[in-house]
Amino acid sequence: TGRPDEDLLAGLNAPQREAVTYRGAALLIVAGAGSGKTSVLTRRIASLLRTREAWPSQILAITFTNKAAGEMRERVQQLVGDTAQGMWISTFHSACVRILRREAEQFGFTKSFTIYDSGDSRALIKRLVKEHEADAFGLTPASVQSRISKLKNELADAESYGRSANMSDPAERLFVEIFGDYQRALQKANAFDFDDLIAQTVYLFRAFPHVADVYRRRFRHILVDEYQDTNHAQYALIHELTRPPSGAAADRFESGGMMIFDAPPAASPELSGASLTVVGDSDQSIYAFRGADIRNISEFERDYPGAKVVLLEQNYRSTQTILSAANAVIGNNFDRKDKKLWTDVGAGEKIVGFTGYSQHDEAQFVADEVETLRKAGVDYAGMAVFYRTNSQSRALEEIFIRSAVPYKIMGGTKFYDRAEIKDALAYLVAVANPADELAVRRILNKPRRGIGDVTETAIARFAAEEGISFRDALANASALGVGPKIQKAIAHLDAVLVEATAIMLPASGEVAPPTAVTDGLNVLLGKSGYLDALRISKDPQDEARVENLDELVAVTREFARNNPDGTLLDFLTEVALVSDADDLDDATGSVSLMTLHTAKGLEYDAVFLTGVEEDLLPHRISAGEPGGPQEERRLFYVGITRARKRLHLSLAMTRAQFGEVTVAMPSRFLQEIPHDLIDWRQSPGDVNSRGGMQSRALNARRPGGGFGGSGSGGNRYGDELVPLPQRDRPASDISKFANRIPAKVRDNSDLELAAGDRIRHEDFGEGRVDMVTGEGAKRIAHVRFDSAGPKKLLIKIAPISKL
Ligand code: ATP
Ligand code: MG
């Protein structure tokens, strides 16, 4: 009865309904966290399909991560059934790859192009910086890479930037040269870096209107989630796609281009531009450092005249306490439209605050609370711990392991960043895209075949002289002027690549079997000797590497199962686009640990926001950036608003970071939360007055559980405080060390020292710490002894105690 999409509207509030049902050229949904923006977007897609206003193939929905895309697709499928096939629901990057694979030939690439992740592009830039001897001018690979990335996000290329740059400055001139060389090297390698995927698609659309028209006719409804974090290039892409088709020479193109339609395009010659729906929250814009531009939201009404604006104000995620804290914090940002979120679920629990003496103490609090909540019936999977920087996870992990709390790190060192995985992928790329010199060079001497720099240079020279690719030069081992052993090694590598190519890329007309990628990978890793080299190695790490490669082979099998027609290129594309937030899937049954940036868009019953300290949150790098502290406040706001029922805010008074122990100050953001919302289990004040701290530290200590090599269980810190709680530390760990440590030496791994501390050394007497450098086991204290003068001490083993 009624509208075919009536049931989709059930349970929605009035503005949400309007957002689902409004039909017009442009719709902007602005709303605070947890107000149902993503839910509304999903229902809007379902409604368009249900009412038959759109074919699935006419919908393009953009999400921030591949995982979010998968969830949205699933949700739409639940709502409308299988008709959802053929929709494009993806990230900006995935959508652009699909377009570029189809159109690359239009502008000098082939469809088998490689996608360089930031590690790949860093390697290339490093080589160029070296070739140009640019470090003498203060240009580091890191700085060059981030500048190029920023420029590409603004759609600038080397030429356009060069015209506006101050070319009398030699460093600028050099930068422009490297930028240009970098771009040429990418083109030669038939490769795009991550920023190119967007920027080159925009370029393609602008340079070839008949190509753009194909997509303008196809996508009649474009929807973008998290619009506040789009950068200029992404904005321009959407703008290009929503223009009316220009009608430029369409027929000339359509013979080739029409194949992409899985439904007939609307045939009207005077087609208007696609309808555009964007949703966002300018208070959650946290990617300005990567070029995101909030103005894309604030100027939406100017760019799309007549746009409808819908505001959502009811929050369905969090308790009133959590919302009040979030509202109060974000209210301190100026230059924003005030919007007040409300909820009708009631006040809920107070926010829990805790101040640890050290980051270990803080971590112990988190682990203890997690267990308490678990016993109270909250699933591990419903809990998450957030931090500002990746390195903060280590202290948490240590305690979680000791306390046997199951956890999963999101982001961090990613599977695909491991060296052996990159090697294996380079083998695959060398097959898929032989023009990719970086990939071929990478595998040249992996495993070791005696091919060194000299041979590599000889191959490059031969390729240049003959005007052939680096890869093709390998097929001419005997002409390279290298010794017979090396000739043989090169010829062998070439033969392995040829064999794998025959498996994975059969001659035209033939169809590769679904197992092709798996079989090819096995040939590459097996016959190249790569796996054998790891297997006979005595390095215990190599065992783990073999396991990781097994895992990669398993990934190819799973890929084949999910994509029976998937090609090697499809596989490499999928792998290249896996992003930080995307290994969230197997988080069931474990606590999720992640940075605040990764947390965007997610929600958890209980959230622990750790390290709420000055210099961390707001992070010290933000201090010098215009708008930096405000962006940090938005990040804090994002963190708070992930919590559904319980929020914990914690900090540590001392924190060892970058090899230094620093005294931390509570974050200014804590002051911004009304005091009566927080129940402090241990406030910063408690810790400052030694009494409070002392009692907790002593409570946390186990009888006889002294830590470190002295074996006495005594006090190696020189005072009565034991900052590292000892719960559940396996005894074997300690004795293993104690036996190996000679009399005057001890294991001071966790001794927290900072400039200004007074210490006593068993031989040198008393002195003052000037500074601490290095990290982990290599931390060094620079000490000025009262009588013995200045000395450098390896903290881990020096016979010292803090006074
Ligand atoms: P964020 O800004 O964090 O991305 P959001 O605005 O996208 O948040 P959603 O994730 O869509 O918000 O919704 C937050 C929660 O509220 C979800 O659990 C969702 O299912 C629920 N929700 C949204 N609308 C309603 C509603 N009308 N009735 C009940 N629950 C709702
Ligand atoms: Mg959302």
Image (cartoon, rainbow, N blue to C red):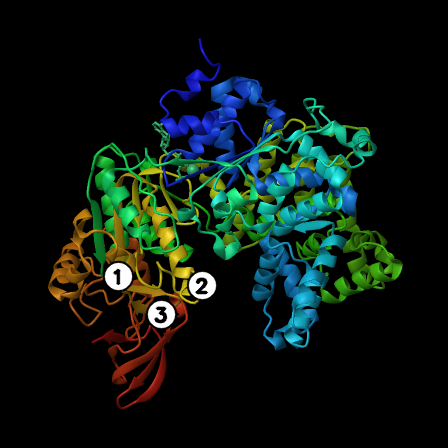
Identify the residue under disc 1. Answer: 666
Quadrant that contains the N terminus? top left
Local SS, label 2: loop
Q: Determine if residue 500 is in view.
A: no
Q: Is residue 95 above or below residue 636?
A: above
Which of 387/504 is in front?
387
- Percent coordinates x, y for residue 122 in the rendering: 61, 59
Residue underneath mark 2:
626
Task: Tell me if 17 is positioned left or right of 128 in this view.
Answer: left
Q: Which mark is residue 209?
A: none
**Residue 215 vertical position relative to residue 267 in the rendered view, above or below:** below
Determine the CA span between mark 2 and mark 1.
Answer: 23 Å
Sequence-wise, which precedes: disc 3 or disc 1?
A: 3
Characterize the local packing of mark 3: few (<14), some (14-19) or many (20 or more) Cα atoms within 10 angstroms: many
Is disc 3 in contact with disc 1, using a CB cutoff of under 8 Å? no
Q: Mark 3 or mark 2, which is nearer the start of the sequence? A: 2
Number of the front mark, 2 or 3 = 2
